[in-house]
Image (tube, rainbow, N blue to C red):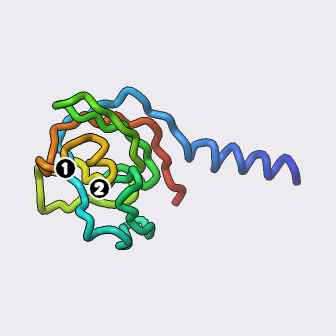
């Protein structure tokens, strides 16, 4: 019985986590306004405008990414909890208000960024 449980652990749980590192993507970041505070996201989590969270079109929920503002070289780490709108093709990632404030682009509305995937969690089907 113990061997079966151990086997299932290695077969199903270990492959669910993968560290991807050094994958860099370039694009634009915008941010959720204050009106999004408390609203439910696609992952089911509610947005806290002061948390360092983001929306991305295709990265799995829970993925941690490093966002660097190209204009001032400031970086933060955020967690993906929502999906971006496909109607705005120039958007690459939508950040929470607190994350955008930390990256110092609130007055501009959007910023050129570099996104580096730190960890990806694949959800089991």
Residue 120, how many percent across, how many down? 46, 43
Image point (29%, 52%), residue name:
95
Image mark for residue 39: none
User: Which quadrant holds residue 116?
Assistant: top left
- In depth, the one of 19 and 93 nearer the eye is 93
User: Which residue lies under the disc numbered 1?
Assistant: 106
Q: Residue pushed farthest bottom? A: 39
Residue sitting at x 40%, y 40%: 77
Q: Say which quadrant the N terminus sits in.
A: bottom right
Label 2: few (<14), some (14–19) or many (≥20) C-alpha neighbours in 10 Å: many
Disc on the earlier residue, 1 or 2 = 2
In this rendering, is residue 95 above or below 68?
below
Q: Which residue is mark 2?
A: 97
Which element is circle 2 on? helix
Name the residue rendered at 31%, 38% in the picture.
67
Viewed as shown, does residue 37 lie left or right of 16? left
Q: Position of residue 78 (x, y in %)?
A: 39, 46
Q: Position of residue 103 (x, y in %)?
A: 27, 40
Q: CA distance from mark 1 to mark 2?
A: 8 Å
Q: Residue at x 21, y 37 (%)?
A: 113
Relative to 32, is 29 above or below? above
Residue 50 falls in which quadrant of the image?
bottom left
Left or right for 16, reference 69: right
Contact between marks 1 and 2 (CB within 8 A): the answer is yes
Most foreground residue, 92 or 52: 52
Residue 5 position within the rendered picture, expressed as x and y whole percent measured from the top left? 79, 52
């Amino acid at each position: 019985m113990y061997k079966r449980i151990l086997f299932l652990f290695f077969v199903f749980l270990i492959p669910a986590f993968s560290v991807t590192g050094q994958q860099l993507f370039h694009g634009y970041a915008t941010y959720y306004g204050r009106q999004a505070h408390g609203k439910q996201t696609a992952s089911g989590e509610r947005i806290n405008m002061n948390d360092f969270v983001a929306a991305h079109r295709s990265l799995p929920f829970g993925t941690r990414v490093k966002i660097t503002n190209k204009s001032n070289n400031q970086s933060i780490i955020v967690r993906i909890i929502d999906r971006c709108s496909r109607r705005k093709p120039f958007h690459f990632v939508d950040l929470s208000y607190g994350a955008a404030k930390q990256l110092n682009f609130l007055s501009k509305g959007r910023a050129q960024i570099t996104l580096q995937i730190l960890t990806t969690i694949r959800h089991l089907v």
